[in-house]
Amino acid sequence: MRLRFLVGNLATALVAALPSQPASALQPKRSADSSELRIPVGRASLHVRTIGRGRPVIVLHGGPDFDSGYLLPELDRFKDAFRLIYYDQRGRGRSADRVSPEDVTLASDVNDIDRVRQHFRLDSPVLLGHSWGAVLALEYALRHPTRVSHLILMNPAPASTSDVAVLRKAYLAKLGADMDRQRAIVAGAAYQAGEPEAVAERYRIHFKAALARPEDYEKLMTRMKAGFIKQGREGIVKARAVEDRLMRDTWDVPAYDLLPKLRGLGIPTLVITGDQDFIPVEIAEHITRSIPNATLVTIPGCGHFTYLECADEVRSAVDDFFRRKGQTPRQR
Protein backbone atom coordinates (compact mmCIF):
# COMPACT_ATOMS: atom_id res chain seq x y z
CA MET A 1 0.00 0.00 0.00
CA ARG A 2 2.99 2.30 0.40
CA LEU A 3 3.39 1.26 -3.21
CA ARG A 4 7.16 1.65 -3.27
CA PHE A 5 6.94 5.42 -2.86
CA LEU A 6 6.06 5.17 -6.51
CA VAL A 7 7.88 8.25 -7.66
CA GLY A 8 10.97 8.25 -5.53
CA ASN A 9 13.94 6.44 -6.96
CA LEU A 10 10.91 5.42 -7.82
CA ALA A 11 3.71 -26.96 20.20
CA THR A 12 6.90 -28.66 22.05
CA ALA A 13 9.00 -29.47 19.01
CA LEU A 14 8.11 -26.16 17.52
CA VAL A 15 9.04 -24.40 20.73
CA ALA A 16 12.39 -26.17 20.66
CA ALA A 17 13.02 -24.60 17.28
CA LEU A 18 12.61 -21.19 18.91
CA PRO A 19 14.67 -21.65 22.06
CA SER A 20 14.58 -18.12 23.41
CA GLN A 21 10.85 -17.69 22.77
CA PRO A 22 8.70 -18.79 25.73
CA ALA A 23 6.24 -21.60 25.06
CA SER A 24 3.43 -19.33 26.21
CA ALA A 25 4.10 -17.07 23.23
CA LEU A 26 2.96 -19.86 20.89
CA GLN A 27 -0.28 -20.58 22.77
CA PRO A 28 -3.60 -18.95 21.84
CA LYS A 29 -4.58 -15.82 23.72
CA ARG A 30 -8.31 -15.30 23.86
CA SER A 31 -10.48 -12.25 24.39
CA ALA A 32 -14.27 -12.10 24.42
CA ASP A 33 -14.70 -13.03 20.76
CA SER A 34 -11.21 -13.30 19.26
CA SER A 35 -8.03 -15.25 19.84
CA GLU A 36 -4.35 -14.69 19.08
CA LEU A 37 -1.59 -17.22 18.50
CA ARG A 38 1.76 -17.61 16.78
CA ILE A 39 2.66 -19.94 13.93
CA PRO A 40 6.38 -20.80 13.64
CA VAL A 41 8.06 -20.08 10.30
CA GLY A 42 11.74 -20.91 10.29
CA ARG A 43 13.51 -19.05 13.11
CA ALA A 44 10.59 -16.67 13.48
CA SER A 45 6.82 -16.85 13.93
CA LEU A 46 3.73 -15.19 12.53
CA HIS A 47 1.35 -13.30 14.78
CA VAL A 48 -2.19 -14.48 13.99
CA ARG A 49 -5.56 -13.18 15.17
CA THR A 50 -8.83 -14.99 14.51
CA ILE A 51 -12.40 -13.86 15.02
CA GLY A 52 -15.85 -14.97 13.95
CA ARG A 53 -17.59 -18.13 12.82
CA GLY A 54 -18.38 -19.49 9.38
CA ARG A 55 -16.49 -19.82 6.12
CA PRO A 56 -12.74 -19.34 6.81
CA VAL A 57 -11.10 -16.28 5.25
CA ILE A 58 -7.35 -15.65 5.36
CA VAL A 59 -6.83 -11.88 5.31
CA LEU A 60 -3.75 -10.45 3.56
CA HIS A 61 -2.88 -6.89 4.50
CA GLY A 62 -1.31 -4.31 2.23
CA GLY A 63 1.85 -2.27 2.33
CA PRO A 64 3.71 -4.43 1.90
CA ASP A 65 5.47 -2.70 4.81
CA PHE A 66 2.31 -2.42 6.94
CA ASP A 67 0.65 -4.97 9.22
CA SER A 68 -2.98 -6.00 9.69
CA GLY A 69 -3.79 -3.35 12.29
CA TYR A 70 -5.02 -0.74 9.82
CA LEU A 71 -7.85 -3.08 8.74
CA LEU A 72 -9.42 -3.01 12.21
CA PRO A 73 -12.01 -2.73 13.54
CA GLU A 74 -14.03 -2.26 10.33
CA LEU A 75 -13.22 -5.59 8.69
CA ASP A 76 -14.30 -7.39 11.86
CA ARG A 77 -17.87 -6.58 10.85
CA PHE A 78 -17.71 -9.75 8.76
CA LYS A 79 -17.32 -11.92 11.86
CA ASP A 80 -21.02 -12.81 11.88
CA ALA A 81 -20.63 -14.74 8.61
CA PHE A 82 -16.93 -15.56 8.33
CA ARG A 83 -14.06 -16.88 10.40
CA LEU A 84 -11.48 -14.17 9.76
CA ILE A 85 -7.83 -15.19 10.05
CA TYR A 86 -5.57 -12.15 10.12
CA TYR A 87 -1.80 -12.35 10.33
CA ASP A 88 1.08 -9.90 10.16
CA GLN A 89 3.28 -10.91 7.25
CA ARG A 90 6.82 -11.99 8.06
CA GLY A 91 9.11 -9.14 9.09
CA ARG A 92 6.23 -6.75 9.69
CA GLY A 93 4.20 -5.74 12.74
CA ARG A 94 4.15 -8.41 15.41
CA SER A 95 5.80 -10.90 13.05
CA ALA A 96 9.10 -8.98 12.94
CA ASP A 97 11.10 -10.66 15.71
CA ARG A 98 13.95 -12.93 14.57
CA VAL A 99 13.48 -11.82 10.96
CA SER A 100 16.14 -10.24 8.78
CA PRO A 101 14.87 -8.42 5.69
CA GLU A 102 16.92 -10.69 3.45
CA ASP A 103 14.96 -13.65 4.87
CA VAL A 104 11.78 -12.40 3.22
CA THR A 105 11.03 -12.99 -0.44
CA LEU A 106 7.91 -13.30 -2.55
CA ALA A 107 8.34 -17.06 -2.30
CA SER A 108 8.55 -16.99 1.51
CA ASP A 109 5.45 -14.79 1.71
CA VAL A 110 3.54 -17.22 -0.52
CA ASN A 111 4.79 -20.16 1.57
CA ASP A 112 3.67 -18.39 4.75
CA ILE A 113 0.10 -18.23 3.46
CA ASP A 114 0.24 -21.99 3.06
CA ARG A 115 1.65 -22.39 6.58
CA VAL A 116 -1.34 -20.48 7.92
CA ARG A 117 -3.72 -22.60 5.82
CA GLN A 118 -2.13 -25.82 7.03
CA HIS A 119 -2.08 -24.71 10.67
CA PHE A 120 -5.86 -24.31 10.64
CA ARG A 121 -6.31 -27.53 8.59
CA LEU A 122 -8.13 -25.72 5.80
CA ASP A 123 -8.56 -27.37 2.42
CA SER A 124 -9.47 -24.29 0.39
CA PRO A 125 -10.22 -21.09 2.31
CA VAL A 126 -11.21 -17.74 0.88
CA LEU A 127 -8.30 -15.35 0.39
CA LEU A 128 -9.08 -11.68 1.00
CA GLY A 129 -6.33 -9.27 0.01
CA HIS A 130 -6.32 -5.49 0.31
CA SER A 131 -4.07 -3.37 -1.93
CA TRP A 132 -0.68 -5.16 -2.07
CA GLY A 133 -2.39 -8.06 -0.30
CA ALA A 134 -4.46 -8.60 -3.45
CA VAL A 135 -1.27 -9.09 -5.48
CA LEU A 136 -0.01 -11.57 -2.88
CA ALA A 137 -3.35 -13.41 -3.02
CA LEU A 138 -3.03 -13.72 -6.80
CA GLU A 139 0.54 -14.98 -6.52
CA TYR A 140 -0.62 -17.70 -4.13
CA ALA A 141 -3.68 -18.62 -6.18
CA LEU A 142 -1.59 -19.02 -9.33
CA ARG A 143 0.71 -21.46 -7.53
CA HIS A 144 -1.98 -23.31 -5.57
CA PRO A 145 -5.32 -22.92 -7.36
CA THR A 146 -6.90 -25.94 -5.65
CA ARG A 147 -6.15 -24.50 -2.21
CA VAL A 148 -8.34 -21.40 -2.65
CA SER A 149 -12.13 -21.50 -2.87
CA HIS A 150 -12.72 -17.81 -3.62
CA LEU A 151 -10.73 -14.60 -3.99
CA ILE A 152 -11.81 -11.21 -2.67
CA LEU A 153 -9.51 -8.48 -3.97
CA MET A 154 -10.12 -5.09 -2.33
CA ASN A 155 -8.60 -2.04 -4.00
CA PRO A 156 -5.99 -4.18 -5.73
CA ALA A 157 -2.50 -2.87 -6.42
CA PRO A 158 -1.07 -3.34 -9.93
CA ALA A 159 -0.43 -6.89 -11.11
CA SER A 160 2.00 -5.82 -13.85
CA THR A 161 4.79 -3.32 -14.33
CA SER A 162 2.80 -1.62 -17.10
CA ASP A 163 0.01 -0.93 -14.62
CA VAL A 164 2.58 0.33 -12.10
CA ALA A 165 3.39 2.98 -14.72
CA VAL A 166 -0.33 3.83 -14.97
CA LEU A 167 -0.49 4.22 -11.22
CA ARG A 168 2.68 6.31 -11.08
CA LYS A 169 1.30 8.80 -13.60
CA ALA A 170 -2.04 9.11 -11.80
CA TYR A 171 -0.36 9.41 -8.41
CA LEU A 172 1.83 12.29 -9.53
CA ALA A 173 -1.14 14.10 -11.02
CA LYS A 174 -3.18 13.78 -7.82
CA LEU A 175 -0.41 14.90 -5.46
CA GLY A 176 0.74 17.83 -7.55
CA ALA A 177 2.87 20.26 -5.54
CA ASP A 178 2.59 18.04 -2.45
CA MET A 179 5.00 15.67 -4.16
CA ASP A 180 7.89 18.01 -3.43
CA ARG A 181 6.96 18.12 0.27
CA GLN A 182 6.81 14.34 0.39
CA ARG A 183 10.19 13.99 -1.31
CA ALA A 184 11.71 16.36 1.23
CA ILE A 185 10.33 14.36 4.16
CA VAL A 186 11.50 11.05 2.71
CA ALA A 187 14.99 12.44 2.13
CA GLY A 188 15.21 13.71 5.70
CA ALA A 189 17.23 12.04 8.44
CA ALA A 190 14.21 11.53 10.70
CA TYR A 191 12.27 9.61 8.08
CA GLN A 192 15.29 7.58 7.04
CA ALA A 193 15.81 6.60 10.68
CA GLY A 194 12.18 5.48 10.98
CA GLU A 195 11.11 8.26 13.33
CA PRO A 196 7.33 7.64 13.79
CA GLU A 197 6.41 11.34 13.68
CA ALA A 198 8.21 11.83 10.37
CA VAL A 199 6.75 8.64 8.93
CA ALA A 200 3.24 9.71 9.95
CA GLU A 201 3.80 13.14 8.39
CA ARG A 202 4.84 11.53 5.12
CA TYR A 203 1.78 9.26 5.03
CA ARG A 204 -0.53 12.22 5.60
CA ILE A 205 0.66 13.39 2.21
CA HIS A 206 0.78 9.96 0.59
CA PHE A 207 -2.84 9.15 1.46
CA LYS A 208 -4.23 12.66 1.06
CA ALA A 209 -5.85 11.73 -2.24
CA ALA A 210 -6.60 8.12 -1.27
CA LEU A 211 -9.83 8.66 0.67
CA ALA A 212 -12.95 10.44 -0.50
CA ARG A 213 -14.08 12.02 2.79
CA PRO A 214 -12.01 14.08 5.25
CA GLU A 215 -13.43 12.32 8.30
CA ASP A 216 -12.33 8.92 7.02
CA TYR A 217 -8.91 10.32 6.16
CA GLU A 218 -8.43 11.66 9.69
CA LYS A 219 -9.62 8.38 11.22
CA LEU A 220 -7.10 6.42 9.19
CA MET A 221 -4.24 8.83 9.85
CA THR A 222 -4.85 8.73 13.60
CA ARG A 223 -4.84 4.93 13.49
CA MET A 224 -1.71 4.76 11.36
CA LYS A 225 0.22 7.20 13.51
CA ALA A 226 -0.57 5.14 16.60
CA GLY A 227 0.59 2.05 14.70
CA PHE A 228 3.89 3.67 13.72
CA ILE A 229 4.55 4.71 17.31
CA LYS A 230 3.84 1.17 18.51
CA GLN A 231 6.01 -0.31 15.76
CA GLY A 232 8.97 1.90 16.66
CA ARG A 233 11.94 3.01 14.61
CA GLU A 234 13.56 -0.40 14.31
CA GLY A 235 10.34 -2.06 13.19
CA ILE A 236 9.62 0.67 10.65
CA VAL A 237 13.08 0.44 9.09
CA LYS A 238 12.93 -3.35 8.97
CA ALA A 239 9.50 -3.36 7.33
CA ARG A 240 10.70 -0.80 4.79
CA ALA A 241 13.66 -3.03 3.91
CA VAL A 242 11.32 -6.01 3.56
CA GLU A 243 9.21 -4.01 1.14
CA ASP A 244 12.26 -3.14 -0.93
CA ARG A 245 13.14 -6.85 -1.09
CA LEU A 246 9.63 -7.77 -2.27
CA MET A 247 9.70 -5.07 -4.91
CA ARG A 248 12.85 -6.61 -6.34
CA ASP A 249 10.86 -9.82 -6.83
CA THR A 250 7.92 -8.08 -8.50
CA TRP A 251 7.53 -4.49 -9.71
CA ASP A 252 11.25 -3.95 -10.22
CA VAL A 253 11.26 -6.79 -12.75
CA PRO A 254 10.63 -5.18 -16.18
CA ALA A 255 8.67 -8.19 -17.43
CA TYR A 256 6.58 -8.69 -14.27
CA ASP A 257 3.03 -9.37 -15.45
CA LEU A 258 0.47 -11.65 -13.80
CA LEU A 259 -2.36 -10.72 -16.17
CA PRO A 260 -1.74 -13.35 -18.89
CA LYS A 261 -1.36 -16.05 -16.24
CA LEU A 262 -4.68 -15.08 -14.64
CA ARG A 263 -6.56 -16.16 -17.77
CA GLY A 264 -6.17 -19.76 -16.66
CA LEU A 265 -7.39 -19.11 -13.12
CA GLY A 266 -10.81 -20.65 -12.51
CA ILE A 267 -11.33 -19.38 -8.97
CA PRO A 268 -14.50 -17.30 -8.38
CA THR A 269 -13.20 -13.79 -7.76
CA LEU A 270 -14.71 -10.57 -6.46
CA VAL A 271 -12.81 -7.36 -7.17
CA ILE A 272 -13.88 -4.30 -5.18
CA THR A 273 -12.63 -0.78 -5.75
CA GLY A 274 -13.76 2.80 -5.27
CA ASP A 275 -14.21 5.37 -8.00
CA GLN A 276 -12.15 7.81 -5.89
CA ASP A 277 -9.27 5.38 -5.28
CA PHE A 278 -5.82 6.83 -5.98
CA ILE A 279 -5.14 3.56 -7.78
CA PRO A 280 -6.94 4.08 -11.11
CA VAL A 281 -10.05 1.95 -11.60
CA GLU A 282 -8.61 0.62 -14.85
CA ILE A 283 -6.08 -1.41 -12.85
CA ALA A 284 -8.90 -3.28 -11.10
CA GLU A 285 -10.59 -3.62 -14.49
CA HIS A 286 -7.47 -5.21 -16.00
CA ILE A 287 -7.36 -7.81 -13.22
CA THR A 288 -11.08 -8.52 -13.51
CA ARG A 289 -10.96 -8.97 -17.27
CA SER A 290 -8.00 -11.35 -16.94
CA ILE A 291 -9.78 -13.78 -14.59
CA PRO A 292 -12.54 -15.73 -16.36
CA ASN A 293 -14.78 -16.01 -13.30
CA ALA A 294 -14.33 -12.51 -11.85
CA THR A 295 -16.80 -9.78 -10.94
CA LEU A 296 -15.89 -6.11 -10.48
CA VAL A 297 -17.80 -3.84 -8.11
CA THR A 298 -16.86 -0.15 -8.27
CA ILE A 299 -18.32 1.82 -5.36
CA PRO A 300 -19.15 5.49 -6.01
CA GLY A 301 -17.76 8.08 -3.60
CA CYS A 302 -15.25 5.65 -2.14
CA GLY A 303 -11.45 5.65 -2.12
CA HIS A 304 -8.64 3.18 -1.44
CA PHE A 305 -9.97 1.91 1.90
CA THR A 306 -13.40 0.67 0.83
CA TYR A 307 -13.91 -1.54 3.90
CA LEU A 308 -13.62 1.61 6.06
CA GLU A 309 -15.18 4.26 3.84
CA CYS A 310 -18.09 2.29 2.39
CA ALA A 311 -18.58 -0.59 4.79
CA ASP A 312 -22.25 -1.25 3.98
CA GLU A 313 -21.65 -1.29 0.23
CA VAL A 314 -18.68 -3.64 0.64
CA ARG A 315 -20.74 -6.00 2.78
CA SER A 316 -23.53 -6.02 0.22
CA ALA A 317 -21.05 -6.76 -2.57
CA VAL A 318 -19.56 -9.71 -0.65
CA ASP A 319 -22.98 -11.12 0.31
CA ASP A 320 -24.22 -10.80 -3.29
CA PHE A 321 -21.05 -12.48 -4.57
CA PHE A 322 -21.54 -15.60 -2.46
CA ARG A 323 -25.27 -15.61 -3.16
CA ARG A 324 -24.63 -15.61 -6.91
CA LYS A 325 -22.19 -18.47 -6.48
CA GLY A 326 -24.96 -20.47 -4.84
CA GLN A 327 -23.29 -20.55 -1.44
CA THR A 328 -24.05 -18.69 1.73
CA PRO A 329 -21.04 -17.31 3.64
CA ARG A 330 -21.55 -19.85 6.43
CA GLN A 331 -21.05 -22.79 4.11
CA ARG A 332 -17.58 -24.33 4.19
Image: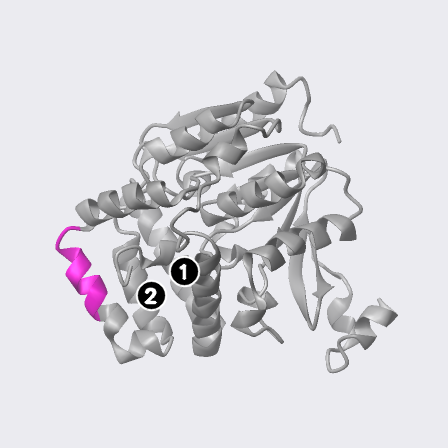
Kindly state the secondary structure of the residue where label 2 is placed: helix
Q: What amino acid is labelled 2 in the image?
A: Ala
Q: What amino acid is labelled 1 in the image?
A: Met
Horizontal and vertical percent position of residue 35 = 71, 56
Q: Residue at x 40, y 30 (%)?
A: 286
* Residue reaching furthest to the left: 177
Horizontal and vertical percent position of residue 245 = 47, 64
Residue 230 appears anywhere in the view: no
Marks 2 and 1, how far apart at CA: 7 Å
Horizontal and vertical percent position of residue 304 = 37, 42
Q: Which residue is mark 2?
A: 200
Of the numbered discs 2 and 1, the one sitting upstream in the chain is 2
Kindly state the secondary structure of the residue where label 1 is placed: helix
Q: Specify few, some or many for label 1: CA neighbours under 10 Å numbering under 14, 14-19, or 20 or more.
A: many
Horizontal and vertical percent position of residue 19 = 77, 81
CB-based contact (under 8 Å), mark 2 and mark 1: yes
